[in-house]
Image: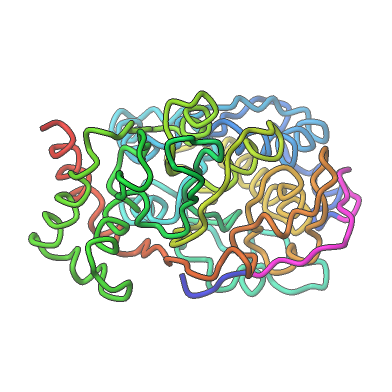
Amino acid sequence: MSKIIKLATGVALASTVGVGATVTAAEMAECENCGDSMTIVSWGGAYSKSQLKAYHEPYSAATGTEIINDESSAEAVAKLRAMNEAGNVTWDVVDVVASDAIRLCDEGLAIEINPDEDLAAAPDGTPASEDFGDLLVSDCFIPQIVYSTTFGYRTDNDDWNGATPSDICAIFDTDGFPGQRSLEKRPIANMEWALMCDGVALEDVYDVLETDEGVERALAKLGTIKDQTVWWSAGAETPQLLADGEVAIGSTYNGRLFSAIEEQDQPIAILWDAQMFDLDGWIIPAGLSPEREARARHYMKFATDTQRLADQAKYISYGPARASSAPLVGKHADLGIDMAPHMPTDPANAQNTFLYNYEWWADNRDDMDAKFQAWLAN
């Protein structure tokens, strides 16, 4: 990622449509057919809750639109391919990671969006294209957040003799940190961490992964903990596995760990070392009727304005993707704690980060998925 947005604290957030917002009440009233329903696809758990509070509820209150939540984002590419082939696209707005957005755009499964025509400017008049800047990595993708995939671990693990992990490679150290692990059931992040912990320099990871030998090397390293690993598909699984004591350490999204630690008071801590930065945001599927597409565009303009992206940070520890949103990040809506220190982009947490190469994964994802799933099945 070529740009990381740093967050600031201290400015209270507005929660009412039209107060501090850059989409006005008049603009909200302009949407025809907004009294209908629309299906918005996301990831579930604490993340979907943050969207519900920051986007969905105020949008529904202002327009009368019923929003149906679908938690299928992990399968977005495959399902949109199938819907497009069948000529029956049932989703209106879809939350995806950047690499999946690039794939969907390249395949003609997502519509192009002109930031300066389709999105709200910043409050000071800065065009949306400049406000999002380098994070606009696809013509079809509008980012919401900067987040990271990282590790959480139990803080009360008697088998660790008081030791706590400070290095990403603790995941492979089953002698020093015994217990079950949890890893995502896909190659992204796992392959990079495996190579790093097998001695590959950070800057060489993707060059090595480009080769068959590099793929085998990564899978071999993962094979050393394969029989001690629970493989997850939904981001909420690792926090629950940690809370239940079924795993000692596991990967997930930093916002899910924040929820478990700060909101649920679970005995869990975050290992920030080699956290993998990524982008997450919206696409609008191709193949919608003109009315549905207009409604989806209207929603996206609202949900990506400066105030709304800042509002989401009141509920989950992800950095807003607009530069103008960062100064508006303040305290958690319910806990009253400052959110900036919990962001992956906070300097104390970002001392050793891995910048996820979404372009590489967009080009290689299908092939790597096939190899990884074949390895898992053996």
Quarter of the figure with the C terminus: top left
Expressed as whole percent of the image width and height from the top left, the position of residue 217 reads 14, 57
Figure colour scheme: rainbow
Expressed as whole percent of the image width and height from the top left, the position of residue 265 reads 69, 33
The vertical placement of 259 against 112, above or below, is above
| Residue located 47% across and 28% down the image | 241
Which one is in front, 267 or 161? 161
Q: Is residue 53 left or right of residue 179?
A: right
The vertical placement of 374 against 211, above or below, is above
Which one is in front, 365 or 168? 168
| Residue located 48% across and 49% down the image | 163
Q: Residue furthest front?
A: 161
| Residue located 42% across and 60% down the image | 167
Q: Is residue 292 left or right of residue 302?
A: left
How would you classify the magenta stretch by its main secondary structure? loop
Expressed as whole percent of the image width and height from the top left, the position of residue 188 reads 32, 51
Q: How many marks?
A: 0
Expressed as whole percent of the image width and height from the top left, the position of residue 179 reads 36, 35
Q: Is residue 268 magenta?
A: no
Which one is in front, 27 or 52? 52
Q: Is residue 102 left or right of residue 6?
A: left
Which one is in front, 310 or 352? 352
- Residue 129 sits in which quadrant? bottom right
* Magenta segment: 6-20
